[in-house]
Every structure is written in structure tokens, then in C-alpha cells.
Image (cartoon, helix red, strand yellow):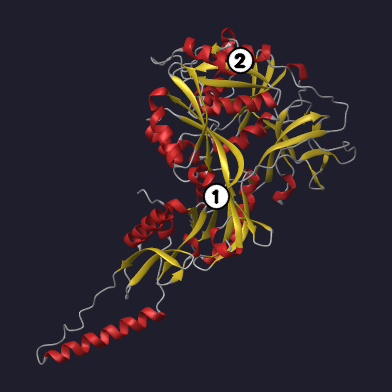
Amino acid sequence: MKLNTEVVDPTKIRNIAIIAHIDHGKSTLADRLLELCGAVEQRQMREQYLDSMDLERERGITIKLQSVRLEWKGHVINLIDTPGHVDFGYEVSRSLVACEGVILVVDAAQGIEAQTLANTYLALENDLEIVAVLNKLDLPAADPDLHAGEMEQVLGMPAEEVLGISAKTGMGVEDLLDAVIERVPPPVGNESDPLQALIFDSHFDTYRGVVSSVRVVNGRLKQGQKLLFIQAGAVHEADEVGVRSPDNSPVDSLGPGEVGYLIAGIKDVRDARSGETITDNNRPADGALPGYREPQPMVFCGLYPVDGDDYEDFRDALDKLRLDDGSFTFEPETSTALGFGFRCGFLGLLHMEIVRERLEREFDLNLIATSPSVKYQIVMNDGTELVVDNPSTLPQSGDWREISEPYLKASMITPSAYTGTLMELCQARRGRMEKMEYLSPERLEIVYTLPLAEVVVDFFDQLKSRSQGYASLDYEPAGYEPGDLVRVDILFNSEQVDAFSTIVHRDNSYEYGRRTAEKLKSIIPRQQFEVPIQAAIGGRIIARETVKAFRKDVTEKLYGGDVTRKNKLLKKQKEGKRRMKSIGRVEIPPDTFIRALRLDD
């Protein structure tokens, strides 16, 4: 394989990421940049070129950051396309560590959204140069003057420096590339220093092992070099070093400021986590690079294989996927209803949905997910503190004196016409208003403090529904507050099914219990005996529904005679049903757990 041995002048390198709110045109802009710089031939071009997963194309969203090397007017531009949804903010924060600047994309028809603000603050925290652009100028609804003024007022960016482009038609994209070269500073690094390179992303290849995306900070990363992975303490040889342009192209070495990939035949996924620092084993650097702050999971659920024999494969799949997405956690747990599985933590509900779907698709698994829950802090009667993320492990109410739940600071940007209905939604979810500020006469920002448990299930869907899709949401943790919370258990035939246990506010517990019992009645198949479905708080039943038994006509074979013969058969059947009910086991189909969670279906 022919290697590219050309050495790149660090002053000619620009490392940038594209950041924006979801659906503001990041991936479309990346497509135009690939075309303009000649990285992809016209006949090979397709929409969302950098989005490599089928899931990303189907949903029209970016899930994984993707890096690519472009060349423009004698300069090398290392571009990273990032996700826009709030659940994948960890991907954005990882990308920015590998950059000196960002392209901030704002929809010229919609203006600043909640995630625009969040990503801008993230870029400012990392001290990055921001090149602001208004996209979709080709739309009839575009109002660049209004939104450029909005960006100046809210983000402090001079309106005259905001570029106008259309990523769809390519208008203004050349000027954007020129602005990137002019405004974004080149990377700082010393080639004579010991090697320091940061892994900012990794994925597992079945044939080649771990493939890591790296940013060289100091020194030079060469093919065949003996490398020390500082945090893992492992030594591996660099089998291949290269750049993505956008296909993998091997090179002889990567110098300071360059971004590329590394393959070192690593089979143990723990050796090459994101945030790992690589150095030369023979001439190691003094210390590791700062790396990343570990993300804190906000939503928890149990994942169980439908077939218990798949448990080991499931554990391997979680290990490999965690390399690709370091923002979810997992630990083993056991359920009486579902067997062996894992308690997994996610950054949000969409993140949970995506991880589960990737496990099923990429590793050919069939999984059951339990109801999403959050992490609660318990103060026991003896003063000890306990953290609970699984409702079934919550101690009896008499054993603890206080329970606290996590809260969010939720920022919503909406057209002023929908203010009332969004305030009503937040009040119904036990929210407290913190701030209301007009960004322009037609748009305002509303900030509420809300319990996380009230947000994780369907808050985002309700927000979009009530605002006809125009409102946007961003949130950040706001600590814990005590609450009047209870555990609602679901009993089948007087036996508790731990997978259905949920912690809810006492005021909402009766409504939740009633709706869950009604829903389960409609989806649990009828048995040979009558099955009572009960919702309970402690030892008190708060709701009940009954699944009627199959009825078999035992008198069918009678052809006459005294009525006492008929009564005798019916009495015998009744006794059999009673005995079956006392020893019978309710068969619950696997999809019941999934369907039961969708209480609004």
C-alpha cells in the first residue's frame, strides 16, 4: 500500500467543527464542503455523506461525530461534523477539544434555538474562534437581517461578520471556507517534543480491532512506532496511521495539529477509550493530556435479552458499543420477571432509544427495555444515604425519612404565540418558572426548573406538539430537591412484577396506577384462569383491572337428563379454575413491557 509521505506545514492547518441546533443544515453544509474541496467525486456524492449509519439516514439526524480532511487554496482543513440533538452533547464536547475554531450554523428562517445557545457557550468555554453563518437563505421565509441582529443581541457577534449561505445550493460556501482560513488560528504544537496525541473517538472493526480518531498535539505519530497508552498502561505498535479524506488514506506520519486515525491491532476495547493520551514508548511525554470529563447518565432502564442464552453476546456487544459511544453506562442486574440483564444509564430518552436500536441491529440481538427511571437520593432513618436508580430496589417507606429527585434547568425558545400552552405544560409537570426573556418581538426564551422524571418520557414530544414544531429545548442538571414520592408496584395474580415498578409523585400515583392497569388489561393475553392486575403503594391497592379467563363449555357433551348433572359439571369446573388460579403462572409476552410503557397510545 502506497503511503503519503508529504509533511504538512502546521501554519497551513485549520481544525474546525460544525455546530448547530438539530435540523439547521450541518450535514448538508458538510456535503457542500466535500464537493467544493474535491474530496468526493460528483458521481459518488450522496446526501448526508458523512453519516455512515443506516439509523442516521433513516431518522435524518447525526448521531456520531465524523471527521474528514479537506484541502482548500493550499491549506488543510480538518472538519468534524457533530450531532445537534441535546442527548448527544457529549459528542460535541469531545469534538471541540480537537479544534481551534467552529462554524456556528443558524437557520435563517428560524433563528437562534436552544441548542444554538448551548453549543455557543461550549465553544466559548473551550476558547475557540467562532465563524457564524446564517444558512438556508434560499428559503422564502428566510430573514437574515432579523436573525443576524438577534445573534448580535444574544450571542454578542457583530451582525456584519455573520456570513449568509445556502448549504443546499452552495451559495456563499466558498466565502465561508475563505473566512475559516482567515479567522481560525493554526494549531500550536512542537514537533521536537515527545509525542502527545489525544484519542477523541473510537470504534471497533471486526477485522482490524479498535480504530481510533486522534489529534496530534506535540511530536510526530509514525507508522510502526511503539506507542504507550498512558491511562491504560498498555503498549501497542502502530500498524497503520492515516487521514480520512473521507475514505481512509494511510500516511507515513502525522505531525503537530494534524487529525487522523490510528490502527494498532487493539482487541481489548478498554485500552483505547476516548480521552486516552498516546505517547512514544521509548521517549514518553511527562504526562497525559486533560482528556474528557465523564458524562453523567440522567435516564436509566433495564435491558434484557429475550433469549437468556444471548446474555454473554449481549455483554460483549455492550463493551464494543461503549467504545463507540462512551456516554452510556451499564452494570449487571437480575429481574425475577426478565432474568439476567444490565442496568444501563443514558444521557436522555432519544439516546436510550438509539443505543437499544444499535444493539439490536449491529449485534443481532432481541432486547426488552424496562420503564425509564432516574437516580434518586434516599436518606435512611439511621442517617445513611443511598442512591437508587432502579425503582424495585427502593426500600420500604418506613425505612427512610427523605427522598430527593433530580431537577433540570430547561431552556425553551419559542414563538410568542405558544407561550401560554408551554407554560401550562411546564406547570402540569411540577415546573417552576425562573426566567422569561424576549429575544425579539416575536420570539422569547422561557426557563423552568423541572423534575427530571417529568421530562424523560414524553415532555419533548408534548413540547413539539403544542408549538407545532417551532419550540426548541435545551437542559442542564440543577441538583436534587426533596419530594413526596412513592413507589407504585404492579401485581399480576397477587405477585409483584419488578419490571413494572415506578417511582412517581404521590399526587400523580393514582392516575398512573389506573392508566397502567387499564393498559395492561388490554394487552395481556387471556389465561385459563382469571388474572387480577393491581396497582399498589406499599400494602395498599390503588387500582384494579381483571383479565377474564377463557370459558370452555363443559356442558357441551350433555344431551339431556336432570339439571343436577349440568350443575355438577359446572361446580367441578369452578373448583378446577380456583385450584389453577392458586398455582398458575401468568404468561407475559416479551413485547408487553414495551407496549405498556406507551401509555398514550
Q: Is 455 placed left or right of 400 in the picture?
A: left
Q: Circle 2 sits on which residue?
A: 156
Measured Cα–Cα span from mark 1 to mark 2? 39 Å
Query: Which mark is nearer the camera, 1 or 2?
Result: 1
Q: For numbered disc 2, what is the local secondary structure?
A: loop
Give the image location of residue 29, x and y in percent: 53, 22
In front of the other: 189 or 296: 296
**At x 55% / y 12%, what residue is drawn?**
163
Give the image location of residue 59, x and y in percent: 45, 37
How crowded pointer 1 is (Cα within 10 Å; few <14, some 14-19, many 20+) is rated as some
Q: Is 402 placed left or right of 588 in the picture?
A: right
Q: Is 562 placed left or right of 408 in the picture?
A: left
Quarter of the rendering occupied by the N terminus: top right
Asked if residue 250 can be seen in this view, the reply is no
Q: Are marks 1 and 2 in contact (CB under 8 Å)?
A: no
Give the image location of residue 3, x and y in percent: 73, 30
Q: For numbered disc 1, what is the local secondary structure?
A: loop
**At x 77% / y 20%, what residue is drawn?**
10
In the picture, the disc for residue 483 is 1
**At x 45% / y 20%, what residue is drawn?**
443
Q: Earlier in the sequence, mark 1 or mark 2?
A: 2
Residue with the most extreme top position: 160
Q: Amino acid at mark 1?
A: Gly
How crowded pointer 2 is (Cα within 10 Å; few <14, some 14-19, many 20+) is rated as few
Q: Is 412 placed left or right of 249 in the picture?
A: left
In front of the other: 475 or 56: 475
Asked if residue 105 can be seen in this view, the reply is yes
